[in-house]
């Protein structure tokens, strides 16, 4: 048994090394004075300073953040509303159909989604005689489309865990349905909304394939910028930028996990209180 435990620990350690060693190397060499990825010639912030002077890269970072924030905000609002609607459905066939439709953008390969959306945007643009069919709006619609399922799948379980009598009690006390939703339901499902928002943001920030097919000439995101650089050479400025993005995403994941842990603790405390109340009634 001890031998199996040791083997499992070694296996886990090897997996962690395999996953995080490339990121660690990237972080270390982002502080390298030279361009080499094999020889560390000395600690320097040179590439971070070079990054701040690269206006084209900074513009692509700004575009990526604007797109990610816009897509995550819209998809969070739409996804929360969709989750509420799905949760209230009582027809099991309709619910199964909507669950399937929700899962399709997640299961469908990105390249299929990207090509199909590009064709749709070009068709609609030509139908209305638009000068250009692909622009920021088409990218935003595409990002909202593939971010929506992640929000729905985070919010829906929280709605199912919530006590169904809470909004009814609020309406009995004089709240309108909308006020009951905002004052009672939203605080209960907030951890799911926050997690869905963070997931939508990271998915939009990371996307390349769908963005590549739905972007216009005047709008370039960071993944597309890096892809264009690989045709020539990727400078260590990109190592510095990747390091910054890694720590930003790490911070978002920590926030998400902490909110999830708080939600789990609150749920456990609620269950303990309910058990105590039942015991008190029995006695």
Image: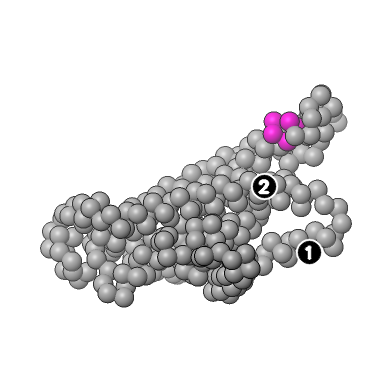
Pinpoint residue 114: horizontal percent, then vertical percent: 55, 70
* Mark drawn on residue 80: 2
Image coordinates of residue 238 in percent, x first then y, are 29, 61
The kind of secondary structure the magenta stretch mainly shows is helix
**Residue drawn at the location 46% of the way across and 65% of the way down:** 216
Please check the rendered image and state whether residue 181 is part of the magenta-colored stretch, yes or no: yes
Q: Residue at x 59, y 48 (%)?
A: 74
**Would you say the residues marked 1 and 2 are in contact, meaning their CB atoms lie under 8 Å apart?**
no
Q: CA distance from mark 1 to mark 2?
A: 18 Å
Q: Secondary structure at mark 2?
A: helix
- Of residue 74 and residue 156, the one placed in the foreground of this image is 74
Residue neighbourhood size for the residue with mark 1, other residues' Cα within 10 Å, grouped as few (<14), some (14–19), many (≥20): few
Does the image show residue 106? no
Q: Quadrant of the C terminus?
A: top right
Q: Nearer the viewer, residue 165 or 149?
A: 149
Q: Is residue 248 above or below residue 56?
A: above
Q: Residue at x 60, y 51 (%)?
A: 75
In the rendered structure, does residue 242 fall within the stretch colored magenta?
Answer: no
Q: Secondary structure at mark 1?
A: helix
Q: Label 2: how many residues lie within 10 Å, few (<14), some (14-19) or many (20+)?
A: many
Looking at the image, residue 174 lies above or below residue 184? above
Q: At 49% across and 48% down in the image, what residue appears?
A: 69
Regarding residue 34, the answer to whether it shows in the image is: yes
* Horizontal arrangement in the rendering, residue 133 relative to residue 278 (left or right): left
Instruction: Determine which residue is flagged by label 1.
Output: 97
Relative image position of residue 198 (x, y in whole percent): 52, 49
Work out whether residue 246 or residue 138 is closer to the camera in this orientation and state it: 138
User: Residue 137, image x and y in percent?
Assistant: 54, 57
Q: Which residues are magenta?
A: 179-183
């Amino acid at each position: 048994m001890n031998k199996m435990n040791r083997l499992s620990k070694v296996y886990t350690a090897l997996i962690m090394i395999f996953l995080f060693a490339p990121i660690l190397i990237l972080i270390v060499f982002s502080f390298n004075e030279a361009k080499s990825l094999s020889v560390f010639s000395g600690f320097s912030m040179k590439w971070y300073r070079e990054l701040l002077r690269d206006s084209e890269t900074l513009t692509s970072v700004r575009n990526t953040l604007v797109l990610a924030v816009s897509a995550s905000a819209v998809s969070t609002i739409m996804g929360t509303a969709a989750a509420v609607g799905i949760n209230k459905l009582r027809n099991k066939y309709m619910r199964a159909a909507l669950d399937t439709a929700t899962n399709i953008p997640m299961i469908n390969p990105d390249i299929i989604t990207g090509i199909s959306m590009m064709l749709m945007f070009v068709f609609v643009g030509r139908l209305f005689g638009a000068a250009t069919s692909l622009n920021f709006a088409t990218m935003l619609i595409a990002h909202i489309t593939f971010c929506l399922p992640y929000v729905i799948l985070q919010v829906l379980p929280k709605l199912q865990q919530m006590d169904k009598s809470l909004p009814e009690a609020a309406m009995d006390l004089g709240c309108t349905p909308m006020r009951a939703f905002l004052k009672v339901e939203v605080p209960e499902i907030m951890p799911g909304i926050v997690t869905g928002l963070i997931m939508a943001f990271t998915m939009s920030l990371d996307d390349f394939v769908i963005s590549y097919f739905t972007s216009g000439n005047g709008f370039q995101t960071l993944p597309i910028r890096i892809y264009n650089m690989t045709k020539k050479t990727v400078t260590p400025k990109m190592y510095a930028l990747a390091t910054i993005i890694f720590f930003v995403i790490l911070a978002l994941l920590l926030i998400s996990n902490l909110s999830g842990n708080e939600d789990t603790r609150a749920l456990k405390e609620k269950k303990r209180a309910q058990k105590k109340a039942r015991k008190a009634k029995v006695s």
